């Protein structure tokens, strides 16, 4: 019985020490350009989907997915989401390309989430997703705005013309990147 308990303790202790050493000695890939850790994507997706299944609103949006709400959702999306998640028929931004994991480009066929219920997207918009760069917007947007953008994404493949027009604008470039630094002005000689 003693050998069994010793084997059990060592069987649990040695892997735990190895995992701690892996992270503590800097072997874990943490740069966005590094390849993922073994099972990283699987474990992250499993945890995310389990949490969403437990907490996401099971109901539909508390408002209709009409043109007015989809246009408002497009405005919210263009201002808050397009920088990472892209716009229709536009390339991903440089910031998005530098993130890990890459944020889904929600208007590209491969990344479209039109099959996700609006409640699932609402949960993601409201809470954010840890270690992905996806912030939670619960403190920045109203529940109505979060539902509107969630409905927009759920209906991305069949948007009314006015919502498409809002999304056709190029992605906003941060003000700091729009203008080059001003050239230094020569100082006047006070003699």
Image: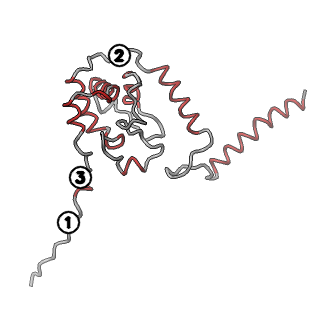
Quarter of the figure that contains the C terminus:
bottom left
Q: Is residue 7 left or right of residue 175?
A: right
Q: Quadrant of residue 75?
A: top left
Label 3 Cα neighbours within 10 Å, binned few <14 / some 14-19 / many ≥20 = few
Vertical side of 32 occupied by 104: above or below: above
For marks 3 and 1, the one nearer the N-term is 3
The residue at 23%/40% (across/down) is 168
Mark number displayed over residue 46 = none
Mark number displayed over residue 182 = 1
Vertical side of 14 occupied by 161: above or below: above
**Whether label 2 touches label 3, CB < 8 Å:** no
Q: Quadrant of residue 171?
A: top left
Quarter of the figure that contains the N terminus:
top right
The residue at 37%/38% (across/down) is 108
Mark number displayed over residue 60 = 2
Question: Residue 144: percent from the left, percent from the top?
Answer: 27, 23
For marks 1 and 2, the one nearer the N-term is 2
Q: Secondary structure at mark 3?
A: helix
């Amino acid at each position: 019985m003693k050998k069994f308990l010793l084997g059990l303790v060592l069987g649990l202790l040695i892997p735990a020490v190895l995992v701690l050493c892996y992270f503590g000695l800097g072997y874990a890939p943490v740069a966005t350009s590094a390849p993922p850790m073994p099972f990283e994507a699987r474990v992250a997706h499993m945890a995310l989907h389990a949490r969403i299944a437990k907490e996401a609103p099971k109901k539909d949006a508390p408002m209709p997915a009409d043109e007015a709400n989809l246009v408002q959702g497009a405005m919210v999306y263009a201002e808050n989401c397009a920088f990472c998640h892209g716009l229709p028929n536009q390339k991903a931004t440089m910031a998005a390309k530098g993130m890990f994991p890459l944020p889904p480009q929600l208007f590209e066929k491969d990344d479209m989430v039109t099959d996700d219920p609006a409640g699932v997207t609402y949960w993601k918009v409201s809470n954010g997703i840890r270690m992905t760069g996806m912030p939670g917007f619960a403190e920045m947007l109203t529940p109505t705005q979060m539902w509107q953008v969630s409905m927009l994404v759920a209906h991305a493949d069949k948007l009314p013309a006015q919502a498409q027009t809002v999304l056709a604008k190029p992605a906003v470039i941060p003000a700091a990147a729009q203008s080059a630094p001003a050239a230094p002005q020569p100082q006047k000689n006070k003699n």
